[in-house]
Image (cartoon, rainbow, N blue to C red):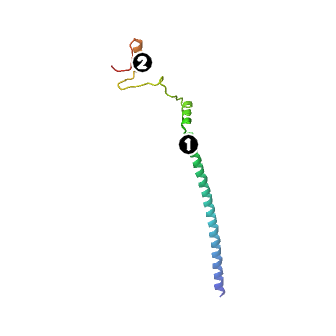
Amino acid sequence: MSRVNLLLLLAVLLSALYLVNVQYESRRLFSELDKARSQAHRIESDKERLQVERRAQATPLRVEKLAKEQLQMRSTTPAITHYVSYGTVPLPAQAASGALAAGVAVSGRVQ
């Protein structure tokens, strides 16, 4: 009879140790899950913040300002606009300057 009691006591102790181990593992996994959720929330808020910043950076006025300052671009005006119509052949600079030197009017049209 004492063997059976000893065997049952050993089984209860082993199951108690197993239960403690399972609870510890469960709490550890829950803690990791909570950390992962908070990190996901932080990443999501960072993503939203960056999207707002991207939209703010892409406003037309800011793009125009950067184009003028960094790329030295300028708005078009009729004074600096070159109109090209069908049948117009652009003349090389040397040919145009040579024709002007010879006193020939250069219109840029093929005749």
Q: Examine the rendered structure and indicate whether residue 49 appears above or below residue 100.
A: below
Residue 101 picture location, percent across and down: 42, 12
Nearer to me, 73 or 19: 73
Residue 70 picture location, percent across and down: 56, 31
Left or right: residue 25 compared with residue 60 = right
Say what amino acid the circle numbered 2 marks.
Answer: Gln
Residue furthest bottom as drawn: 1
Say what amino acid the circle numbered 1 marks.
Answer: Arg
Left or right: residue 43 compared with residue 91 = right
Nearer to me, 4 or 54: 54
Question: Which residue is label 2 attached to?
Answer: 94
Q: Examine the rendered structure and indicate whether residue 25 appears above or below residue 38.
A: below
Q: Which mark, residue 71?
A: none
> In the image, what residue occupies the spot 58% across and 43% down?
53
Secondary structure, mark 2, is helix
Which quadrant holds residue 61? top right
Nearer to me, 76 or 17: 76
Q: Looking at the image, is mark 2 or mark 1 nearer the viewer?
A: 1
Query: Of the residues under marks 2 and 1, which one precedes in the sequence?
Result: 1
Question: Which residue is label 1 attached to?
Answer: 55
Mark 2 surroundings within 10 Å by alpha-carbon count, few (fewer than 14), some (14 through 19), many (20 or more): few
Say which quadrant the N terminus sits in: bottom right
Left or right: residue 58 compared with residue 93 = right
